[in-house]
Image: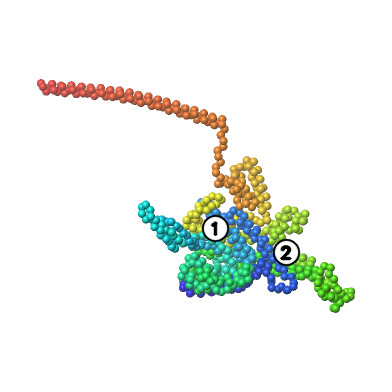
Amino acid sequence: MRDSEILALLGQELDNSLGWLEGKIPQERRTAYKYYLGEPYGNEIEGRSQVVSQDVLEVIESILPSLLRIFTAGEQIVRFEPKGPEDQTIAEQCTDYVNYIFMKDNPGFLILYTMFKDALMQKNGFVKHYYSEEIEEKEEEYKGLIETEFQSLLIDDEVDVLNHDVIENQTDVGVELIYDVKIKRKKKIGKIKVVPVPPEEIYVSRRATNIQDAQFIAHRVFKTRTELMNMGFSKKVVNKLPTYTNTFYNQEHTTRELYETSDPSMEFQSIDKSTDWIEMIECYTRIDYHKTGYAELRKITMAGNKAYVLENEAIDHIPFSMVTPIPMPHLFFGMSVADLVMDLQLIKSTILRQTMDNMYLQNNARNVVVDGQVNLDDLISSRPGGIVRVKGPGAVQPLATPSFLNEGLSMLEKIDQLRESRTGISRTQMGADPDIIQKSHTTATSVNALMNAATQRIELIARIFAETGVKDMFRSILQLITKYQDKPRMIRLRNEFVEMNPMDWANKEMDVTIEVGLGTGNTDQRVALLSQILGVQKELIKAGAMGRLVDEQKIYNTLEKLVINAGFKSAEPFFLNPQTAPPPPPPPVDPVLQTAREEIAMDQQKAMANIQVKREEMMNELKMKEMEIMARLKIEAEKIDSEELRKAAEIETAKIKAGSK
C-alpha cells in the first residue's frame, strides 16, 4: 500500500472519528470543565447576584482522596499470580518490578490522580504506556589526558570530539603529548514511560466499544523538531515538515488554556526553528497493508498537516489504557460524575442567586415616595442616624418585599439530597455533619451503616477502574518489560538491592490481580476485625493449636494487614517476616549437662585411645610371629637345598668313579 493511499485512508478515518470535529462528547466535556471551575453561565444580570455553586468541584474532590487511597495505601498496587507452582518466584519478581517501574521510574501517584480526575470530570481518563529511547547530550571537558586516554575517547561510540589542543611535555624518556579535549557525549537512554493523555487528544472510530478492539484510534500531539530528532527521526525528514502555525488547536484545549492565560493563540509561535511545533498524529488502525485480504494492526504516524508518513510498523497492541466511572454498555465513552451533577449545580446556583437577591431587597428595601414631598438626596444617602427631610407625614412608605429565605434554604437542602442520591457522596464524607454530631441518639452502629452506604458508589467506581484501565495498564507494562529490557537491572526493594532479569519471564503467563484491599470510611472496622482475629489466634496458641490451626506465618499475616490498615506502607519496621527472617540461635545449654557431655566425650576419647593401643600391640605381636615363621621356613628351605646338593654331588662322584674304571 502506497503512502498516498495510507494518508487518504487515515484522513477518512479521522474525519469520521469521535472527537475530531466538534460534537456532543467534546461539547459536554468543555461544559463539565467550566462547571468544575465555577465559571459564569452567561445569563448573569448586572446589579443582581452572580454567585455560582461549585457542586461539580466538591463532588469530584471528595471522591478523589478515597479513590487514590484505595489504590495507593498498600505497598503494591497490583499483584501477578502464577499459572503454576513452578512460577511462584517469577510472579513475585514481576509484582515487585512492575510496581517499582510505575511508582519509582514514573510518577505513579500523579498518573493515577490525573487519570482518575479526567474520568470523573470528562467521562474518560486515558494513559499512554510505551518504551522510549531518547538521546541525552552532554558537553564535557577533559584536561591533561595522555595518549591512551585520548584514544579511548576517540573509539567511544557515544563521544563526538568538538575540539582539542595538543601540548608537548618534555620528560626524561622523551616528548609526551598531553591533550585538552572538549567533547559531546550522546547517550541513548531507554525506559518505560507512562503518561496521562488529555481526552481531547484521543480520537476513536464511532463503532468502538473499547481500546484494544477498536478499528481506529489516533493520538494527536505536538512535538518540537528537536524532540522528533531525539525520538529517532532523521534530521533531513524533520526539517522538511511544515511548522504548525494555526492558532487554534480545538475548543476543549482552548477552554483549558484559558484557565492560565487570556490569549492561548501565542502557544505555537516560535522564532527558533529547532523549537518549532510540528503536528503529529499517531494512528493505530487495522488495515490490509499487504493486500492479502486480512487486516493487521499497525501504527502509522502522520505529520505536517497529514501530508507525510513518518512511521509505519506492525504492532501487537494499542498502547493506551482507559477508565470511566460509569460505563455505558456497548459504548466507548461513559458518563462522568460531572454529568450527574451539572444540572443540579445550575439549579442550585439559580436558587442561590434568587435567595441572595431576596436578602438584598430585605436588607435594602425600596420605598414609596410622594413626589415632591421628600428630599431625595437624604433618602438615597443611607447612613446610621441619618435624617430624611419630608414636607408631610406619610411621604415615605417602605415597599414590602415577600421573604423567600426559608423557601430558598429548603430548596437548597433538597438539591443537596438529590446530589447525594445521585453521586453517593454525602456530607459525612465531605466533612463532619453537625446534624449527626448533635443528635445524641445516633449510635456508632447507625453512623457506620450510613458511611457504608455512602461509600458503595466510590467502591464501585474503584472496582470498575481496577478491572478495566488499571489492570490493562499494568499488564502492558509487564509486556513492555519482557519485550525491550534485554539485560538485568539492579533495583532497591525493601532496603535491599535485588537483581531483576526480565529475560527469564518472557515465556511465562500470569494472571493480574489488582490489590484493592482498602475501602473508604471503614478502616476502623477493618482494624477492629483484624484485632479480633489476632485475639482468636492467641487463644488457639494457648489451647495448643500451634502448628495445626495457626503458625508464625499466619500471625505475621494478621499483623501485616493490621499495620497496613493503620496507614503504614509496610510491616517491616515493626515485625519480622518468618519467611525471610534468619534462623533463630540455638538455645543456651545447661552447665551440668554440658559438663556431663564433656566427661562422656573424654571417656570416649580415652576408650578409643586404649583400643588403638591394644590394636597396635596385637599388630606388633602378629608381625613378630609372622617374622618367626618366615625365619623357620627359610632355615627349612636352606636345609632342603643342602641335602639336594649333597645327593647331587654323590651322584656325580659315583659317575666319575665309574668312568675311571
Q: Residues within 10 Å of mark 2 (few under 14, many from 20)?
A: some
> Which residue reaches farthest bottom?
372
Residue 28 screen position, x and y as percent: 64, 70
Residue 603 pos. (x, y %): 49, 28
Q: Is residue 551 above or below residue 119?
A: above
Residue beneath label 2, please? 416
Residue drawn 89% across the image and 74% down it: 393
Q: Amino acid at mark 1?
A: Asp
Q: Are marks 2 and 1 in contact (CB under 8 Å)?
A: no
Direction right: furthest residue: 393
Q: Earlier in the sequence, mark 2 or mark 1?
A: 1
Residue at point 66%, 48% (across, down): 531
Comparing 502 with 266, the one in front is 266
Question: How many neighbours does mark 1 have within 10 angstroms: few (below 14), some (14-19), or many (20 or more)?
Answer: some
Is 439 left or right of 6, judged from the image as shown? right
Picture coordinates of residue 278 (x, y %)? 52, 70
**Rendered image: mark on residue 105:** 1
Place of residue 567 in the rendered image (x, y in percent of width and height, measured from the top left): 64, 52
Three-letter code, disc 2: Asp
Instruction: Tell me what residue is drawn at x 35 percent, y 24 percent.
Output: 624
Judging depth in this view, the residue of 12 and 345 nearest the camera is: 345
Which quadrant: the C terminus?
top left
Label 2: which secondary element: helix
Q: Secondary structure at mark 1?
A: helix
Residue 408 visible in the shown view: yes
Q: Is residue 85 above or below residue 222?
A: above
Instruction: Check residue 83 in the rendering and tell me which mark sits there, or answer none.
Output: none
Query: CA separation, marks 2 and 1?
Result: 42 Å
Q: Quadrant of residue 342?
A: bottom right
